[in-house]
Image (spheres, helix red, strand yellow):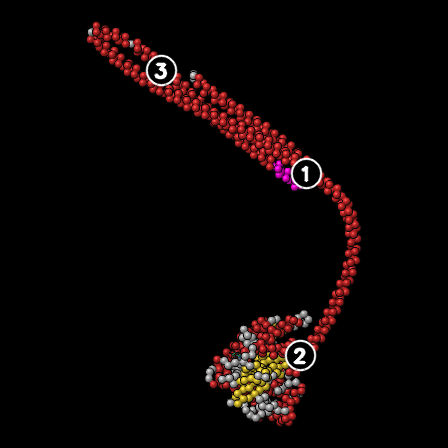
């Protein structure tokens, strides 16, 4: 079945041989690859052995690490080479497979072609035989023609038949020729295909050859590379080994030089060990002496502290005494005047003109122009309209200090409606008055002493209205409270059931009094339902105000004249303020006046009252003289502006002698008149609301009295 012809044989046999070669090559390559791997492995082992041998002795970890790094680099390179080899193996395998496929296809097409050639050859042979047989036939025809010529129409017919047969055969011959031609063409195309296939095979062979060559080259290159890498690694390893050896030598030298130092260290270590062994004892000893020293120092500090504390307390007592003495010298009842500025409410025109002037050289004097005449007054201190809240407080703060020292203190503002009582006592949020500032001072002083003293500050708020005392902070504000003597026999007064709040800051106090204020506002509102505020004061509460004011006047008079009996109990107000008005108590009255022309009558009354109150207590020396200055009812009644003997300073103050000569009749007259306060009230013909303010409280309504002790 193998087709004849050298070309066909060659084409068929060559790829088979080629396939065998490729397999051989692949096997060879695989063997080579394996051998290379083995070599590589052996080299790596060798390298590792070489690298490990010095590294065992090598103390230099860094060098060891570098060597390991190089080794791993080499291993990586070997890995890459191996991967490349595997890739090449794969490529060769693929190419071999493709070649085998091509060979198979070629084999099939050659077999087909051989069959086709066989078939065509057979047909050619048949055709040639047919042609040969046909060629031998014409002589027979000639013979038949001749016969036809000789013979009859029957023969002619036979001749025609023969001719047509001949014709048919010639057509057959033509057709066969055509077939032959086609077959020849087919043969040519087959030959052409064969040539193409051969060219393709040659191309494949060339490609295979080239791939083989390339593979060999790459293998060679890899081999070279591997050898090179191995050589390099080897030489590097040698260099590193040398360096390691050198280092080792250096270390050995160092070791030799270090040995003496080591001996010294060992010696030191031993002596240290001995010291450590002895250290606890030493430490105990040192600690004992240190403890003793510290205890001694602490004891010294303690005794110093005790001494300091003793001195401090003594100084504190001294300060208290001095302060008290100072306040006493200044007078237990001090009277300040404050003139508010002209306000919008004063209106415009002559009525709103300023009627108050001051003495540039004496801050205790002011002049009032009343009905065209100037009347002068002397108080303890006078604040002009431009005086700030701060300046006012500066003068008051000594009293607050007294309060901290344990004295009862009473500060109250007095004056006609709108004269500035609220402004002075309460002030505004941005510019607080005496109350807030006093409380601030109180708390800051207390905080300063907190380390050495225990302070408790409690607040209460009560209202005296129509001679009824009510608790403004209590749960039952309508309940009337009583003022009673303390059952402990101290002689102190107290209000049973009066609510007390313990406070620690000004804010606490404000909260407490805001609460009280709310209750009070309600009361005021109820009051105002019936009449206007001033009217209500005049008509509804006139009697009780009078009673309280009279009582206050009587009390002050009794105090002034040092009478055995001071009628504190004549009114709730004086009774409640008893502690704040008697003994070592200190009282400050701030007389508020309006500078407006239209208010001069009331301003005059207020200032006269202030001047008289001031004259009550001015210390032991002046007391006698002042006693004589207390005006009689008649005196007060006739004490109109511009009169010949007002208490004002604008007129010559009466001499002590002159005053004492008048004192007896004055006292008598005062007694019979029921007190100067009545006189004053009668004279003014209207009521100036009195406001009492405690040191720790600042809310009140005009026309009524309240006090907190
Ligand atoms: N020294 C002052 N400086 C500036 N304004 C003042 C001063 N004194 C009072 N005033 C202002 O005058 C007006 C009346 O003052 P205030 O309300 O304090 O009077 P009051 O005596 O408390 O009146 P009332 O008895 O009716 O309560 C307020 O507008 C207040 O701000």
Residue 67 highlighted magenta (yes or no): yes
- Sequence-first tag of 1 and 2: 1
Placement of the N terminus among the 4 image quadrants = top left
| Residue at disc 1, secondary structure | helix
- In the picture provided, is 408 more to the left or to the right than 218? right
Asked if the beta carbon under badge 3 is closer than 8 A to the nearest atom of ligand 1, the reply is no
Placement of the C terminus among the 4 image quadrants = bottom right
- Sequence-first tag of 1 and 3: 3
**Residue topped by disc 1:** 244
Mark identifier at residue 124: 3
Residue 470 highlighted magenta (yes or no): no
Whether 122 is drawn above or below 319: the answer is above
Mark 1 neighbour class, 10 Å CA radius: few under 14, some 14 to 19, many 20 or more: many
Q: Which residues are magenta?
A: 55-72
Mark 3 neighbour class, 10 Å CA radius: few under 14, some 14 to 19, many 20 or more: some
Mark 2 neighbour class, 10 Å CA radius: few under 14, some 14 to 19, many 20 or more: some
């Amino acid at each position: 079945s193998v087709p004849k012809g050298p070309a066909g044989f060659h084409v068929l046999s060559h790829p088979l041989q080629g396939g065998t070669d490729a397999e051989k090559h692949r096997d060879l390559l695989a063997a080579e690859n394996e051998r290379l791997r083995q070599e590589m492995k052996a080299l790596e082992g060798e390298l590792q052995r070489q690298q490990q041998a010095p590294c065992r002795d090598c103390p230099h970890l860094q060098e060891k690490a570098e060597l390991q790094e190089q080794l791993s680099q080499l291993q990586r390179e070997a890995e890459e080479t191996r991967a490349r080899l595997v890739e090449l193996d794969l490529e060769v395998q693929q190419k071999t497979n493709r070649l085998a496929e091509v060979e198979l296809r070629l084999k099939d097409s050659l077999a087909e072609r051989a069959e086709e050639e066989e078939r065509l050859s057979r047909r050619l042979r048949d055709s040639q035989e047919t042609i040969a047989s046909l060629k031998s036939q014409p002589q027979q025809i000639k013979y038949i023609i001749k016969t036809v010529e000789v013979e009859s129409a029957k023969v002619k017919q036979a001749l025609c038949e023969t001719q047509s047969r001949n014709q048919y055969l010639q057509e057959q011959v033509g057709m066969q020729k055509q077939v032959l031609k086609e077959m020849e063409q087919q043969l040519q195309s087959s030959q052409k295909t064969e040539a193409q296939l051969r060219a393709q095979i040659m191309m494949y062979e060339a490609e295979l050859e080239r791939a083989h060559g390339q593979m060999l080259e790459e293998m060679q290159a890899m081999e070279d590379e591997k050898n090179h890498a191995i050589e390099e690694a080897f030489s590097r390893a040698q260099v590193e080994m040398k360096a390691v050896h050198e280092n080792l030598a250096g270390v050995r030298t160092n070791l030799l030089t270090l040995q003496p130092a080591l001996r010294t260290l060992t010696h030191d270590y031993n002596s240290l060990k001995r010291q450590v062994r002895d250290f606890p004892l030493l430490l105990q000893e040192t600690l004992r002496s240190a403890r003793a020293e510290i205890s001694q120092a602490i004891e010294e500090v303690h005794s110093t502290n005790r001494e300091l504390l003793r001195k401090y307390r003594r100084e504190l007592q001294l300060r208290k005494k001095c302060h008290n003495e100072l306040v006493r010298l200044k007078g237990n009842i001090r009277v300040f005047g404050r003139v508010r500025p002209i306000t919008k409410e004063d209106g415009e025109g002559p009525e709103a003109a300023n009627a108050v002037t001051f003495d540039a050289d004496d801050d205790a004097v002011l002049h009032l122009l009343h009905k065209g005449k100037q009347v002068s007054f002397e108080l303890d201190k006078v604040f002009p309209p431009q005086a700030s809240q701060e300046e006012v407080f500066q003068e008051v703060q000594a009293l607050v200090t007294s309060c901290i020292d344990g004295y009862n203190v009473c500060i109250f503002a007095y004056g006609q409606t709108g004269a500035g009582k609220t402004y002075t006592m309460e002030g505004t949020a941005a510019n607080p008055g005496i109350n807030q500032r006093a409380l601030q001072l109180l708390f800051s002083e207390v905080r300063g002493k907190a380390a050495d003293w225990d302070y408790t500050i409690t607040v209460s708020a009560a209202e005296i209205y129509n001679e009824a005392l009510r608790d403004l902070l209590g749960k039952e504000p309508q309940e009337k409270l009583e003022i009673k003597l303390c059952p402990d026999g101290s002689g102190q007064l107290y209000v049973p059931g009066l609510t007390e709040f313990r406070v620690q800051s000004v804010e606490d106090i404000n909260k407490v009094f805001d609460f009280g204020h709310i209750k009070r506002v309600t009361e005021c509102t109820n009051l105002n339902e019936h009449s206007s505020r001033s009217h209500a004061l005049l008509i509804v509460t006139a009697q009780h105000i009078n009673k309280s004011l009279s009582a206050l006047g009587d009390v002050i008079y009794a105090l002034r004249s040092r009478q055995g009996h001071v009628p504190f109990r004549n009114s709730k107000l004086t009774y409640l303020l008893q502690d704040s008005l008697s003994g070592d108590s200190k009282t400050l009255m701030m007389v508020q006046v309006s500078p407006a022309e239209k208010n001069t009558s009331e301003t005059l009354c207020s200032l006269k009252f202030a001047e008289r109150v001031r004259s009550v207590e001015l210390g032991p020396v002046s007391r006698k003289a002042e006693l004589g200055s207390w005006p009689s009812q008649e005196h007060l009644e006739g004490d109109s502006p511009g009169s010949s003997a007002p208490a004002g300073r604008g007129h010559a103050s009466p001499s002590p002698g002159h005053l004492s000569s008048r004192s007896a009749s004055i006292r008598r007259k005062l007694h019979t008149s029921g007190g100067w306060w009545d006189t004053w009230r009668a004279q003014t013909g209207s009521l100036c609301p009195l406001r009492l303010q405690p040191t720790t409280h600042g809310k009140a309504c005009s026309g009524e009295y309240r006090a907190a002790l």
